[in-house]
Amino acid sequence: MEQKGSKSPQKLSGLRRQHKGLINLMPLQTGGMLTDAAKEALVEFGDGYSVCDFCQGVLCSITNPPIRDFVQEVLPPFLGCDVATITHGAREAKFMVMHSLARPADAILVDGSRHYTTFVAAERVGLNIIEVPHSGHPEFRIDVNQYELLIKKHNPRLILLTYPDGNYGNLPDARRLGEIAQEHNIPYILNGAYAVGRMPITMEEMGADFIVGSGHKSMASTGPVGVLGMKKKWEQIVLRKSTRHSNKDIELLGCTVRGVPLMTLMASFPYVKERVTDWDEQVSKAQWFSAELERLGFIQLGERPHRHDLLHFDAPALYEISKRVREKGYFLYKELKERGIWGPQPGLAKSFKVSTFAAARQQLGFVIDSFKAILNKYG
Amino acid sequence: MEQKGSKSPQKLSGLRRQHKGLINLMPLQTGGMLTDAAKEALVEFGDGYSVCDFCQGVLCSITNPPIRDFVQEVLPPFLGCDVATITHGAREAKFMVMHSLARPADAILVDGSRHYTTFVAAERVGLNIIEVPHSGHPEFRIDVNQYELLIKKHNPRLILLTYPDGNYGNLPDARRLGEIAQEHNIPYILNGAYAVGRMPITMEEMGADFIVGSGHKSMASTGPVGVLGMKKKWEQIVLRKSTRHSNKDIELLGCTVRGVPLMTLMASFPYVKERVTDWDEQVSKAQWFSAELERLGFIQLGERPHRHDLLHFDAPALYEISKRVREKGYFLYKELKERGIWGPQPGLAKSFKVSTFAAARQQLGFVIDSFKAILNKYG
């Protein structure tokens, strides 16, 4: 009965994060830091299938813990949709919509700033992916009016807009695209992975058919978990049931996040619902931070004035330094980490991305001073 | 900037499990209870995307925490496969294999005791699902030789076997099916959601092309997370890369479990690898428990002698009681819970399923005495 020998897994004990407790500017992480309530839920529902104690067959219908209420009563008004469900994350939500509505070789029209997972999800379905180009360096703007021409040319089955995109934090005119979508009667997916849970946004006000959100990116949740909202008219298609197992959603394979990430999403929700009302201050904080970094010689990419906490900077001075130091581009990561700051992708110095969402102004002041000190040190 | 009002989410605070600390016999849960190391990893990597601190673009290639080593070095010998990857769970693994290898209207041959998710995954791909019938009450056996006749008749693109099934804990002759699969050159998926992490099993010894395991069901992990092993020959098909984003797996949508469930799987693994060597004792314990319950008048369904901790009993005496008490079938749940025992599905009394995997013999002795006392109380 001896299992075939495998490599010593000693390295698997004592798994630790090196960045715990640092000032966190990493764009992927600033919206996913847990609330205290979520930390409690994490421990409470940590064991395997423990959310399923009182399951009657369908995750989203469980009443204890109150998943049904959360999905049916709490999420729809928050997302501004008729029907909501839980997914493994934004990418899985996009795939299930594409897989339900489109057939291989159908065209889908997406913005040129789309996340790579939009492309891969469409590719998994076998779609013909048409991209609406952005305006290029330095603003990378998406003009949604360009969708119209491409709709006429390609007759897409679906259109998708990333709001904001993850590279530059640009917020294209999602509402105008809603009008275009309705005019041409084409289902419209709004990818709000960096919007839902950070800023006020509803599917309804944008005129979209679907809204996609990410728990781990923007709703103070453990990864991975996401939300998907839709118009009532799509429920029978996207949430169609199995022919044999009549209570099981085909696209969800019955149930999706049958575990603790969903519990953290629910536990954090009261806080998340509240925090989106502070969005004006978040934008103001990001603009101030951006202006301060520009005074140091960095150049903010993307829309100006900026309207989101995701910020991308060209950093020619850092790049010059990276070319002559032993650590190459890693010097920036090392210097920031020594000062208790974590965010820009290790190894990159030519340009870097940060998010000001989780840091207080005082902390950001320290970050600005740190960049100043680093430039001086190597200047 | 006010978000559209949603129902008061007060119920979302203080989420608690009622069954924490009880003797746990619930089949879904006994293999997914966390180790101490996993509990630590849970807290350490609880925040959103915190496993991605050092991501270079692909989850399974992350070296800190050591995901790459785990996936490339540790898992393959344990699963007896050439190539392994991480999935959201067993159902998602089955879907990705079916979606990669088969086309709509292709036939798939599955055992009649398959989990509902096998059916739904195949349905999501649009497959023609053919079932090899089981022998019916009381043993529900699958004779794998019946696959041969149906292979000749339907020329399936794939075959799948559930080992063991989740209803009766039967272990059909997976090795014989491996010979049949190889003889007919048909890819063979072994669904080991209740095997991998509980008992010694490898894909290689069974002659399968794919092996599917579940972290939350049987590998002491937080839900949801799973593992998929395969022969080298399928790597280019199932783990094919995006045409545009050359390091991204299409079927994984880039990355799957980008969060803490994977960390718990890794943290528990040294313990899980060890515990499968105690399988003889697990089987002996299950057989003893089953014999004791049969002495009380319950009838064990499934194979005899039983070779797995999943047990299903017909309970005519409990059913008689349920017909005359106020709580109906819920009386059993209530009586057991009062005694600190949790397991049979609340509301069911005619027959019930339990797993002896997590409970010690002494605890199971108390469970047997409790059933005795309940029968006496209402007798």
Image: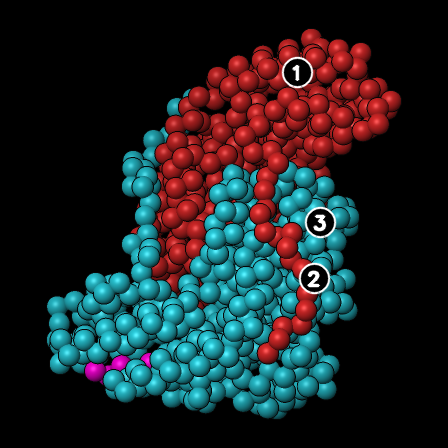
Chain colours: A cyan, B red
Q: Which residue is drawn at 59% across and 57% down?
A: A87
Q: Report crowding for label 1: few under 14, some 14 to 19, many 20 or more residues within 10 A (C-alpha).
A: some
Q: Where is residue A325 in the image (x, y as percent from the top left)?
A: 13, 72
Mark 2: amino acid: Lys
Chain of the residue under the numbered disc 2 shown in the image: B
Q: Is residue B71 visible in this depiction of the protein?
A: no
Q: Mark 1 points at which residue?
A: B370
Instruction: Tell me the quadrant of the picture where the C terminus of chain B can be found.
Output: top right
Mark closer to the chain start, 2 or 1? 2
Q: Name the residue under label 2.
A: B7
Occupied quadrant, residue A317: bottom left
Give me the disc on residue B14. Answer: none
Q: Which segment is the magenta one?
A: A313-317
Describe the element under mark 3 as helix, strand or loop.
Answer: helix
Describe the element under mark 1 as helix, strand or loop.
Answer: helix
Q: Position of residue A276 (x, y in %)?
A: 55, 71
Q: Which residue is drawn at 57% across and 17% down?
A: B364
Q: Is residue B320 visible in this depiction of the protein?
A: yes
Mark 1: amino acid: Ser
Marks 1 & 3, CB-CB < 8 Å contact? no
Point out the frontmost of discs 2 and 1.
Answer: 2
* Residue that protrudes farthest toward the right in the picture: B324
